[in-house]
Image (spheres, rainbow, N blue to C red):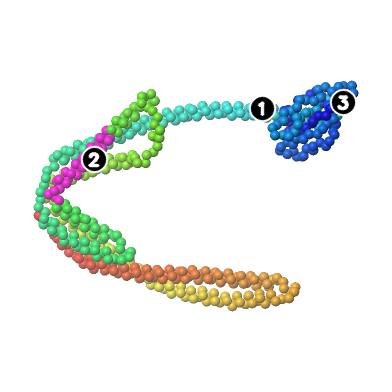
Amino acid sequence: MAKDTVMYSQLQPWSTVAATPCMEQTSGPPVPTRIGQYYQTPRPHPWRPTLGYDNIEVTPLPSQPITNAIVDPCYTPYGMATAPLKFPNLVTGFERNPAHAARAALYTRYTPLEWTQNNLKLYNETDTNRNYSERLRGEFIRVMRETDEKTSQGQRDAGRRLGERITDTTFWRNEVQTELDKLITELGSTTGIKQALEKAVLDIEGPLHIAQECLYQRETRAGMDLVHDAPEQCLLKEVELYRNSQEKINDMLSRLKAQMKNGRAAQHELEVDVRSKESALGIDNMCHQLNNFSRGINYYGGIENFDPTVSTTTTWAEKSNRIVNRSQAERGKTAQIRSEGENLLNNVSSQIWDQWSNTNNALARRAAEQLETKSKIQMHLHKIQQEIFDIEKNLELLRKAILDKSNPMKVAMTRLEARTHRKEIELCRDMAQDRLVTEVKDIQDSIEYLHKKLQEAEAQHQELLKTRSNLETELHNKVSALFIDREKCMGMRRSFPITATIKY
């Protein structure tokens, strides 16, 4: 009987048995007879298949020749050191040895359950993808409609905003143009005025010197009393009023030229603003007329980025309003020049008198406030002194309390030390031992807590001393400031140095 020896490979299956692509199934394999030891497949299966082979003796039936017994060599992947693999025919092998054929079929076939599950999985995946695709198509249509509507709405809103902007710009252009025409008319009709004001300038020097001297005296205040209070504000306003009055009187002869210069500056701003608004109106009108079918529309990269240097609507309106207000002020000043000649000096005298009275009243109120504050500081100084005395007593009591804990601590520690000399089994941790340990810890905690409170008390004592020093310093400063306001400043301002009416 002829015997053929073939190479048989046992492939380790995965979690689901899969047929090896390189195996060609035949009608019936020869009966494999084990010559050597088969490779035992480990359980559970590892994640990677193991490849092995054994020599198998094939014995055909006496009355049947070996036909279709082996398959063609299977392709061996690159890098494998095994010889070409051949697999037995399952049908022939089943006739000779059903056990070997069944085991071979087990390692090279899927089960019907796996076949059914794979089909169900494919159906479910198909339905899922189809449903998802349908939802996506609906979403795409909705998004396209929404973006079209959003774009159209945005373009309509932009056109409406441009129309509103054109309306605002036209309004301010008309306002500025009207003010420009009025200013040009007023500047053309301005006439010069001449007045003799030398005596008035000399009369103002007296109160100006007194106000400056009061400011110099109040600069000698110390600490927090060097405050920018109401009397100082009044004195500064008074000095400013005197200097402005002198400037007005001294510049009356040349005021016409200066006013004309200011008017020309305001006129220049108005003209520049009118030209800018005319240009902006032309650009905005062109933009308002543009549509999707206009010529000249194009892409401009980065043009939509925000420029932080440009003005906003608020600043734009404020600038135009400021220019108009300035022009109105200059025009009003120019109109008043013709009627200010005779009334100027009397008005200046009235303003000086009112400011002089306001300053005196402010100094009196400030002196009363300082006197009241002085009394309160003295009261707080007395209270803080009493508190310092009380906390010093508490400091001594805390130190004594800490010192009093020394002997109890010594007693507890001595007891613990003495009990360590007990012999043999008597050296046990009994309730007395635990209580002594607890007592030592409690005393230590008490001492630590008392030290903490002592530190707090000492820190508070230092704060009280600092507060007392601050109060004493403030009391000294208040006395000095009260003397300056009530004696020095008000002493110089008891009488008005000039008459109520200045005549030229």
Q: Residue at x 61, y 70 (%)?
A: 441
Mark 2, secondary structure of its residue: helix
Secondary structure mainly formed by the magenta segment: helix
Whether 254 is among the magenta residues is yes
Instruction: Give the image location of residue 258, x and y in percent.
Output: 16, 46
- Residue shown at the point (51%, 75%) measured from the top left: 399
In this rendering, which labeled residue sits more in front, label 3 or label 2?
3
Residue that numbered label 1 is attached to: 123
User: Where does residue 268 sit, x and y in percent of width and height?
Assistant: 22, 40
Mark 1 lies on a secondary structure that is helix
Kindly identify the amino acid type of the residue bearing the numbered disc 1: Tyr
- The residue nearer to you, when weighing 192 against 352, is 192
Magenta segment range? 251-278
The quadrant of the rendering that contains the C terminus is bottom left
Residue 91 shows in the view: no
Question: Residue 475: which quarter of the image?
Answer: bottom left
The residue at which mark 2 appears reads as: 269
Give the residue type that dot 2 points to: Glu
Report the residue at 19% width, 62% height from top.
210
